[in-house]
Amino acid sequence: MRARVLIRPREEILDPEGQTIERDLQTLGFTWAENVRAGRMIELDVPDSPDPEVLSAVCETLLANSLTEDFEAIDEHGNVLASSLVRTSAENNGNH
Amino acid sequence: MAARFGVLRFPGSCDEVDAKLAAEHVGEAELLAHTETDLKGCDVIIVPGGFSYGDYLRAGAIASNSPIMRAVTEFAGRGGLVLGICNGFQVLCEAGLLPGALLSNVGLRFVCRQARVEVLSKHTPFTADLEIGAQLSIPIKHTTGRYYASEDTLGKMRESGQIVLRYVDDDPNGSADRIAGVCNEEGNVFGLMPHPEHAVSLLAGPSADGLRLFRSAAASLLEKAGV
C-alpha cells in the first residue's frame, strides 16, 4: 500500500519559510491566510497493515528530525498509520 | 610525531581540499571517501563543508548514515577528536554526535561574509590553547545555520562549557544565544558554522585566525602523546 509521511516543523520552532509564504499570500489579498506553516511530504510504498512502530522508526531514524519536526504517516484515506503527535488509530482501537 | 588529520569527502562536499590544506599547516592530512569504513589511523577527523548528497531531506541527514560515519561515531565514542565545519556541523548534529539541530537562516538568505566570533569555552581541544574572550575573524557562508536546541538542553550546555563560539556583532542566522559553535559533553567533538579552513593565510583573506583552532587541536594531541 501507499503511505504519505507529512513532516512539519514543531510548534515551538520558528518557521521563516511559512512566514514568507504567509506574507506573500497577504500581499496577494488573501488576508484570511494566517499562521502558515511549511513542511514536507514524502510518499512511499509500505507493507499492507504496516506496524506503527516500524513506521515510526522509519520516520525517527531518517525522514524527520525529532528535535525540530513532527511526523504523521497516513494512508490514502487519511487514516493515521503512525504519528509523533497523537496515538495511532491501531493503538486507539486496542483500547476500545 | 605529527598530528594526522583525515578529511571526509561526501558526494557534494566542496571544502574538503581547503580543510586538508589548512590541516597541513599543523600536521599531515589525507582525504577519506564516504564509502570507507576505516579511518586509517587518523588522529583528528574533519567533516567538511559543502552540500553532502545535495542537502536532500535535511542538510547533513543522508551523510550522517554513510558508511564512514559509522566509523566516525565509533572513533568519537573512544574520545577521538572530530571537527565539523558548516555542513560537517550539520552532519554531526544529524548523527547525534552533537546536541541540537541547524535550521534555515531566519530571513532565508544565504549569508556570505567575514564574521567575528568570541571564544566562550576551552572545554574542547580545538579551543584549549585560546583564551576565553578571544575574538576570531572567520568567514561564514551558509543558508542553514540557525542553531537550535531546547531551553533545557541549552541550560545544560551552558553549565558544562559546551557553547564554544558566539557571534560578536550580530546574529547572522537567528541562532539561539548567537551560537556559532558547540561541542559535546566530553569536548572531543566540536562543530561550528564559520569556516576556519578559509582563514589560514593572509594572502587569501583578512585573517589567519582559523589556523588557531587547528593548532590548538594539534598541540593537545602532541601533549597527550607526551611529545
Image: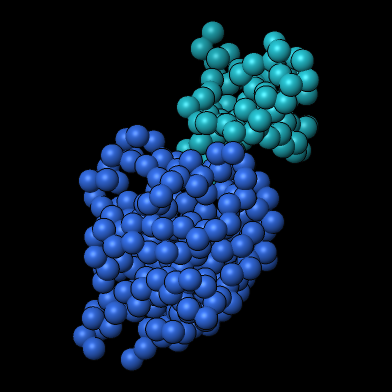
Chain colours: A cyan, B blue
Whole-percent x, y for residue A75 in the image = 73, 25
Residue B21, x across and y down, in percent: 52, 81
Q: Camera-side residue: B179 or B65?
A: B179
Can the viewer see residue B195 in this picture? yes
Name the image quarter holding the C terminus of chain B: bottom left
Q: Is residue B127 left or right of residue B32?
A: left
Picture mark count? 0
Outermost residue toward the bottom in this view: B1
Quarter of the figure with residue B2: bottom left
> Which of the pair A53/B147 is nearer the observer?
B147
Give left or right: position of B223 versus B51: left
B130 w.r.t. B6: above or below: above
Q: Residue at x 46, y 64 (%)?
A: B138
Q: Which quarter of the image is occupied by the N terminus of chain B?
A: bottom left
Q: Is residue B130 left or right of residue B172?
A: left
* Residue closer to the observer: A28 or B194: A28
Q: Give residue B108's position: percent from left, percent from top.
A: 62, 41
Q: Residue shown at 64%/59% (left/top)?
A: B51
x and y percentages locating residue B186 in the rendered image = 28, 59
Q: Quadrant of residue B74?
A: bottom left
State the residue at coordinates (26%, 58%). B133
- Residue nearest the viewer, comparing A65 with A82: A65
Q: Is residue A38 visible?
A: no
Specify whether B93 is left or right of B51. Answer: left
Q: Residue at x 64, y 22 (%)?
A: A36
